[in-house]
Image: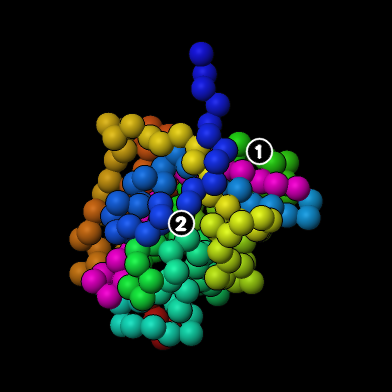
């Protein structure tokens, strides 16, 4: 008998924990994006933890800025940033308020609203690629900078919410270095994913960008 996933929203206390506890515990949870055209839901299959001022790979390593202010809490809020001049990426803030940390949502399996996601991800060759990578995930869900600071734990209607879903068994969770992170932050094995899941993005080490002459 297949047990349907739990559709209960995750409470704020779920996110009010150290980032290295929250990150692997987000695997198997359901992210719901409510849009005027209808909802899109995906099961999270890959994430990365970023530990603020303890982590050279974090946007908050050097302190608070206008860009990263949401990372400093409260927990359960959404941090959206723009990267490479073209893509948005989505994070969930965790830990105590005032101490910046967040989990980057890297990949997921679209389980509802795939027809809406396909319209945004015309280059996807199949549904497994709709949210395979953090920029693809944000694109499929229609997440942009205007959703930065959204409270995913707020009562009532909210454009983004995390449901309980079905937690992944510990023996099915893998971890390793974070994709594309350079320097001292590159050594942390803080990328977590579900073993053998086809929606998980491939690992890529950091490659320095060449300056044009």
Prevailing SS of the magenta stretch = strand
- Name the side, left or right, on which 39 lies relative to 62: right
> In this picture, which residue range is highlighted in magenta?
38-55
Residue at left offset 66%, top offset 46%: 40
Measured along the vertical axis of the image, is residue 37 above or below residue 149?
above
Label 1 element class:
strand
Is 70 in front, or is 173? Answer: 70
Name the residue rendered at 35%, 67% in the picture: 96
* x then y, percent, for residue 59: 38, 74
Pick the front one: 26 or 212:
26
Label 2 sits on residue: 12
Position in image of residue 83 (x %, y %)? 50, 71
Marks 1 and 2, how far apart in space? 24 Å
Secondary structure, mark 2, is: helix
Residue at label 1? Answer: 112
Instruction: Tell me which residue sits at (53%, 34%) in the image.
Output: 6
């Amino acid at each position: 008998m297949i047990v349907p996933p739990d559709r209960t929203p995750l409470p704020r206390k779920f996110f009010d924990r150290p980032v290295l506890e929250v990150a692997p515990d987000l695997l198997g949870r359901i992210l719901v994006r409510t849009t005027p055209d209808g909802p899109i839901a995906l099961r999270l299959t890959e994430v990365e933890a970023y530990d603020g001022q303890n982590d050279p790979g974090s946007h908050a390593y050097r302190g608070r800025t206008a860009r990263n202010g949401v990372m400093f809490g409260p927990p359960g809020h959404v941090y959206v940033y723009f990267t490479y001049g073209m893509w948005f990426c989505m994070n969930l803030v965790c830990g105590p308020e005032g101490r910046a940390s967040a989990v980057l949502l890297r990949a997921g399996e679209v389980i509802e609203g795939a027809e809406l996601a396909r319209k945004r991800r015309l280059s996807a060759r199949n549904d497994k690629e709709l949210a395979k990578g953090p920029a693809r995930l944000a694109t499929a869900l229609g997440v942009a900078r205007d959703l930065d600071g959204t409270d995913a734990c707020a009562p009532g209607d909210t454009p983004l919410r995390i449901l309980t879903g079905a937690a992944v068994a510990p023996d099915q969770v893998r971890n390793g270095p974070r994709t594309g992170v350079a320097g001292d932050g590159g050594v942390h094995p803080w990328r977590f994913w579900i073993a053998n899941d086809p929606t998980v993005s491939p690992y890529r080490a950091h490659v320095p960008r060449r300056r044009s002459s």
